[in-house]
Amino acid sequence: MSDRVEQGTGTAEAADGPELARALRAAVRGEVLGDAASRALVTMDASNYRRVPLAVVAPRDADDVAAALAVCRERGVPVVPRGGGTSIAGQATGTGVVLDFTRHMTAVESVDPATRTAVVRPGVVLDDLCRAAGAHGLTFGPDPSTHSRCTLGGMIGNNSCGSHSVAWGTTADNVLALEVLTYGGERVRLAPGGDGVPERLRAGVRALVRGELARLRTGFPEVPRRISGYALDALLPENGEDWARALTGSEGTLGVVTAATVRLVERPGARVLAVLGYGDESAAAEAAAALLPYGPLTVEGMAGDLVPEAERTMLPRGGAWLFVEAGGADAAEARAHAERLCRAAAGTAAGHVLVADPAGQRALWRVREDASGTATRMPDGSEAWPGWEDCAVPPARLGAYLRDFRALLAEHGLRGVPYGHFGDGCIHVRIDFDLVSEAGIVRFRRFSTDLADLVVAHGGSLSGEHGDGQARAELLPRMYGPETVELFGRFKDLWDPAGGLNPGMLVRPHRLDENLRFAPLPREPLPVVFGYGDDGGDFSAAVRRCVGVAKCRNPADSPGVMCPSYRVTGEEMHSTRGRARLLHEMLAGEVVTGGWRSEEVREALDLCLACKGCRRDCPVGVDMATYKAEFLHHHYAGRRRPAAHYSMGSLPRWLRAVSATRTAPLLNLLARTPLASLGKRLGGIAPEREIPPLPRAPFLRLWRRHRRTSPGGGGRRVVLWPDTFTNHLSPEAGTAAVRVLEAAGLEVVPPPGAGRVCCGLTWVSTGRLDGARRVLRRTLDRLEPVLEAGLPVVVLEPPCAAALRTDVPELLPDDPRARRLAAAVRTFAQALEEYAPDWTPPRVGRPVAGQTHCHQHAVLGDAAERRLMERAGLTGALSDGCCGLAGNFGFEKGHFEVSAACAEEKLLPSVRAAAPGTVLLADGYSCRTQLAQLGGYRARHLAEVLAQALEEARERAGAPDRTGTGPGGTAVTG
């Protein structure tokens, strides 16, 4: 090829995408993906930028990489290496071919404890390397907050750092050698001395360095986090001519890394976290540098705006804090080290706490690690964006820099909450840029140039961790001067004379206000059904919540719920981020066409369990369950739906009919005949599923019988919600709850029209939102007396309680009764704690296993349940995660395999490992059903366990049972 591959060539306009994909498939053994969905998934990273590639290649090895490069080189198509896609400056996006290393090139090839080194492939996730090294008491020092999903190749491309860089340095400090392929096809081994570099390249680079010795020795600022530009000074003779270090941080613009030899460090035997409180972040910043001589492992800064109230109880007094970690060979040594650090800070800190227990440390570090997401929403809910995410100045100047930075924000009418690596002088911040309007983009550009000048005035680096990418490369002349930037261009041309690797980054860059991700989105809000109150009623703004930090790509066995389908499949399209990307591209209409009728989006959402885990676990509160319901509503508008939407979406209606006709015994009989297979096929139900047996009598019928014979409690009146699952499928949970609530002195009453009230859950989960609103309006009409009286509404089934809390006010935002109902909802444990605080639960005194329902985790919280279990002597913890049944999801045809795999992640292993005599708890009917069908286990609602304990206590006391329920709270139905 003769022409340089510049920003404007190698795009969809200049190359034939299908023909390119065919050529790539003929050349490589890995996957070649040219379909709209696969391309849409990599249009963005975690930055403000968006580019549409022609194809995605997942190479199996270095030979595949070489073959893909040859095909692209022949056609003049640019190539972008990509790891976890968490880059914040735009360097992991491109218009040509994206190399995805996360599918196959993920191995830790070797760990050598004697030399403390490891050899890894570029797609290995950092946590996987650390686990392999941990078997030898070692770890990899740099640890970005995305450590659970970022890759070593991406870290090498960006020269990533993390919170422990004050102790163990940047990625460049820990890379010993690199195996690289150039765009021209040369295989290069980079290490100090350059012996593995082809003579053409070695001679050219050495001549460049020799000709610019003075500039290279004086033109690079002395900053611990100087990430911007190329590290040409690493090639100076006095620096050991370190070729690997020179390429680290080059953002995939010089060569494609296919393997790396990295340095490992000894992992401390014990750690203690000292949290120091200060009046504001400037005071914390000024104090940080003084702690460095005492050898801390971390000196991290957090402002009060980023710390949730629940976590503040663990912190000392202050408006900002330093998280200072101390290590030692054992707990005593680590604590003594932490105490020395606290004494050193005594003159400046307002107070301190020492956190030695690992669980407490993890809770606080989660707050810090989630900041890259939580900072994208200002305290008033408005949006904030990266772009000036990680400038760094000398640590001693950080306090002064922060004051000037705050003043500059105010001058431009902008807001942001700084946090970050105070010990290294590196500040992270998301700023409330308006990146949609023309005036907002002009202000974004003006602020960017002013801030670049401010950073340089303080002797700093435009990038202190995440690279220059498109966000800052245009401004490198302000930091280095035009001569040094011209030198960068000559260095790039020696490596990549055709300009085929990641063009537009670092050298001859795109403008910082080009290719903005929001440009193709609709300017006016779409007509939607949900209210999206936190996003101004704008579905596009709701989708924009996903900024790409990819916490949803956490692997199996990670804490939390999000994202169960990704944990099972490992496919980006089944992650929360992947689905949000496809929705974004659906709205843009360039790659994913067809709008609401898009099959690509429907396919991605098909395996969304609507667990709502992302609502809680995603740092920015993406609520994919709601987006899925919205999409299904529009996708099937005026069209025939899948059979399961009618069979299970209308489940309350069918079950009411069964109750009215008293045909449960007949249906149970039919479910055991060959007709069951026909019924499942007609209803769109998975053939692997058993039809759950129906009780002879629903809960409401049993409750009416009970109310005729029992006077009930005489205390606070509470309304018990007769949800569909409790009423028609699990009446024993309802009768047990009545018994316990009455034993606690509460008067338990049904709502008016009890058999006809409904939370609309099944209509929402199948996207039948017009039906859901009709159901909810009727429900609110019936509940008006309850709402007028201000009575609490106790809901036993977690997804129904979550629907009443969140879906009802979102579907009926203009009806004040919806908000009043949401505010009245209480779980079983919350009702006991709030309205019977002096009641003492019966002592069970047994260990527990089971699962907290995913909707409880995401919407309701389980703190009251945990306290109630503790008071009842139920020891141990329930597993988190998702059971995989998820209402209708696990019953739908085609979902059984994923549903069962979700249960195998946490729930079933925890139950199998339970000791004899363990109480199996699951407040959700879906969780209980999954345990019964996949493992033959009988789990119970917490109310059932307490009711049984009450009965056993009554029997020991010799008192008769007057409650209308049998032992254990099981309904008497005969």
Image (cartoon, grey):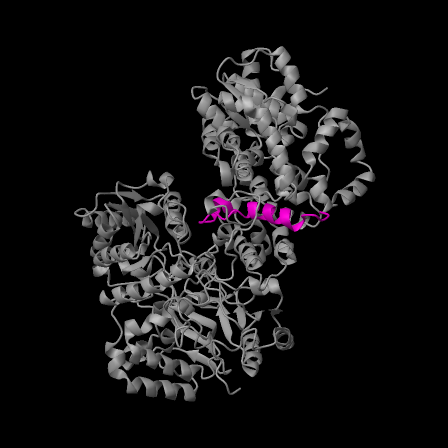
- Is residue 638 magenta-colored? yes
Is residue 570 in view from this perspective? no
Quadrant assignment for the C terminus: top right
Q: Residue at x 23, y 55 (%)?
A: 403
Task: Please state the horizontal and vertical placement of residue 275, each as a whole percent of the image.
Answer: 28, 46
356 over 575 or under it: above or below? above
Of residue 407 and residue 245, the one placed in the foreground of this image is: 407
Region of the chain picked out in magenta, as a range: 614-641
| Residue located 25% across and 78% down the image | 217
477 versus 305 height, above or below: below
Relative side of 646 to 580, left or right: right
Looking at this view, name the residue that lies furthest to the left.
Answer: 347
Q: Is residue 207 magenta?
A: no
Residue extending furthest toward the right: 674
x and y, in percent, of residue 897 in the image: 67, 50
Residue 71 quadrant: bottom right
Residue at coordinates 34% horizontally, 81% vertically from top-left?
Answer: 486
Q: Residue at x 56, y 45 (%)?
A: 626
Left or right placement of residue 867 versus residue 761 in this view: left
**Where is residue 15 shown, x and y percent of the image?**
58, 77
Q: Is residue 266 left or right of residue 218?
A: right
On the image, the x and y values in percent for residue 443 come to 35, 61
In the drawing, does residue 578 fall left or right of residue 170?
A: right
Q: Is residue 131 visible?
A: yes
